[in-house]
Image: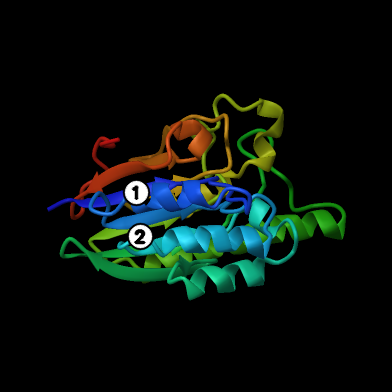
Amino acid sequence: MPVRIAAAGDVHCRETDPDTPRREFAELNGKADLVMLAGDLTTHGQPAQAEVLAAACREVEAPVFTVLGNHDWHCDQAEEVTAMLREAGVIVLERGTATCEAAGVEIGVVGLKGFVGGFSGSHLPDFGEPLLRRVYRETSDDVEALDAGLREIAMCPIRIVLLHYAPTDATLAGEPPGIWAFLGTDRLAAPIAEHEPDLVLHGHAHAGTFEGRIGAVPVYNVSVPVLRQPFWVFELQGADRATAPIH
């Protein structure tokens, strides 16, 4: 039996519209075995906005996994946002892993926000001012955490990487090339190419492209503006790659 994974990023919940997320999340019941949220859960990272998402997630019968996005850090209240979501039963990952069972299959998830850094021809260097080198080190820590996480879940029949920032420029086409360095970095691609998880999900690139690859690994930009619908449902089975999305 395939595992159905509902994914979305950049839902940008706001306190002025609590009803739409609750309705859209409730509609997943019976249609998804897992829910994956690829960051930018809120508009500005305020607790009141996080409570809107928390209330929506309480409507969902399936496990909900998420990472934070840059918007969720904007007001420097990420700890409060995270606490509210975890109180609602959401599994919030930041350079961490979690496992669960769905449709009789053990699923391992590695989750982290990711960060900037650029792609071939525009990589941020590990050189110069200490502040610039700290940015480079932040991404290095992400790469190391992603590698360690994939090793940790290596024995799971289904392995998923959940990010906010993009690990490949293949899913950025449509965004102005001048801002690609701020949308992610292919430094994150190395552990993905080495460990070959079954599915990689990210958001952040609102004007990007839905589907790309890192070697044999399918990568999907599930930002809601790209999906043009609240969620996309993928089907995976055992060690198979992602099947064609069902909607």
Can residue 190 be seen from the camera position used here?
no
Looking at the image, which residue sits at the far right?
129
Counting residues from the start of the chain, the first of labels 2 and 1 encountered is: 1
Image quarter of the C terminus: top left
Few, some or many C-alpha atoms within 10 Å of disc 1 (few <14, some 14-19, many ≥20)?
many
Is residue 63 positioned above or below 168 on the image? below
Front-most of 132 and 53?
53
x and y percent of residue 185 in the render?
60, 44
Q: Which of marks 2 and 1 is in front?
A: 2
Can residue 108 be seen from the camera position used here?
yes
* Residue under the point 43% across and 40% down: 230
x and y percent of residue 231 in the render?
39, 42
Which image quadrant for residue 172?
top right
Is residue 88 positioned above or below 115 on the image? below
x and y percent of residue 59 in the render?
38, 61
Q: Which amino acid does label 2 sit on?
A: Val
Determine which of the numbered discs, if any, sits on residue 60 in the image.
Answer: 2
Query: How many marks do you count on the picture?
Result: 2
Determine which of the numbered discs, if any, sits on residue 232 in the image.
Answer: none
x and y percent of residue 163 in the render?
51, 53
* Residue under the point 54% across and 52% down: 18
Callout 1: SS: strand
Looking at the image, which residue sits at the far left?
1
Callout 2: SS: loop
Which image quadrant for residue 206?
top right
Q: What residue type is labelled 1?
A: Ala
Front-most of 50 and 63?
50
- Distance between mark 2 and mark 1 Cα atoms: 11 Å
Few, some or many C-alpha atoms within 10 Å of disc 2 (few <14, some 14-19, many ≥20)?
many
Determine which of the numbered discs, if any, sits on residue 6 in the image.
Answer: 1
